Image (cartoon, rainbow, N blue to C red):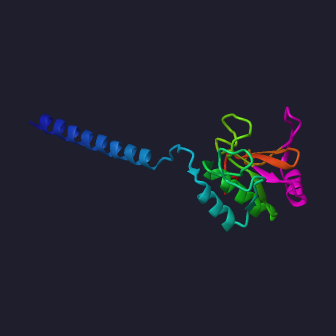
Amino acid sequence: MQEDFQMTMLATRGARVAAVAAVSFAAVVSTAPTASAVTKLTHAQATSQLSAAGITWSSSGGCSNRNVSTCTSFDQVNSSTISGVITLKRASGCAINLTGGTETGHASGTYSHWNGYKVDIALSTCINNYVTSTFAYAGVRSDGATLYKSGAGNIYAKEGNHWDVLYYNCGGC
């Protein structure tokens, strides 16, 4: 009888331990960060954020149609790309004018303009000085563009009349 009682107590204790372990595991799993998909913005959402930060944009075609290469569109741009531009503006104190976004006509690839990872920033003395004195020189791209890499890993390529910027992330926003 005593032995049966001890077995019942051990079984009950084992069930409680198992239950606590299961609840603890569930709590850890539910609070662990999860990988999230890239958040895409509409042109209106992106331009609203840019305007609020004092960032301008221009288009050689005077338009924002994503399917026209002379337009400047931010349709389907990554939220982190827009946040990265805003971070650059705040950190540098420079005026920023975007001249390219997600419109057709840029090089293809996973980390491309079309896929929302890149924007073009007009050259200016302020931006040029900030990028070249703050970010690490990273060589020359195959097309001759000089590369600089931010501490966050984003890549700034100085092309003819603009910076072609690849935002892997928001740069510390």
Asked whether 18 or 133 is in front, the reply is 133
User: Is residue 172 visible in this depiction of the protein?
Assistant: no
Q: Quadrant of residue 138?
A: top right
Residue 97 included in the magenta stretch of the image:
no
User: Is residue 56 visible in this depiction of the protein?
Assistant: yes
Asked whether 70 or 165 is in front, the reply is 70
Query: On the picture, is 152 further left or further right than 43?
Result: right
Q: Which image quadrant: the C terminus?
A: bottom right
Residue 172 appears at what percent x and percent y?
A: 68, 55
Query: On the picture, is 129 further left or further right than 28?
Result: right
* Range of magenta residues: 120-147
Taking the view exactly as shown, the residue that stands out farthest to the top is 142
Asked whether 23 or 74 is in front, the reply is 74
| In this view, 97 is above or below 159 | below
Residue 146 included in the magenta stretch of the image:
yes
Q: Which image quadrant: the N terminus?
A: top left
- Report the residue at 50% width, 45% height from top: 34
- Report the residue at 78% width, 59% height from top: 97
- Report the residue at 91% width, 59% height from top: 125
- Report the residue at 60% width, 59% height from top: 44
| In this view, 129 is above or below 6 | below
Total number of numbered discs in the rendering: 0
Taking the view exactly as shown, the residue that stands out farthest to the left is 1
Residue 35 appears at what percent x and percent y?
A: 53, 43
Residue 74 appears at what percent x and percent y?
A: 65, 52
Residue 47 appears at what percent x and percent y?
A: 65, 60
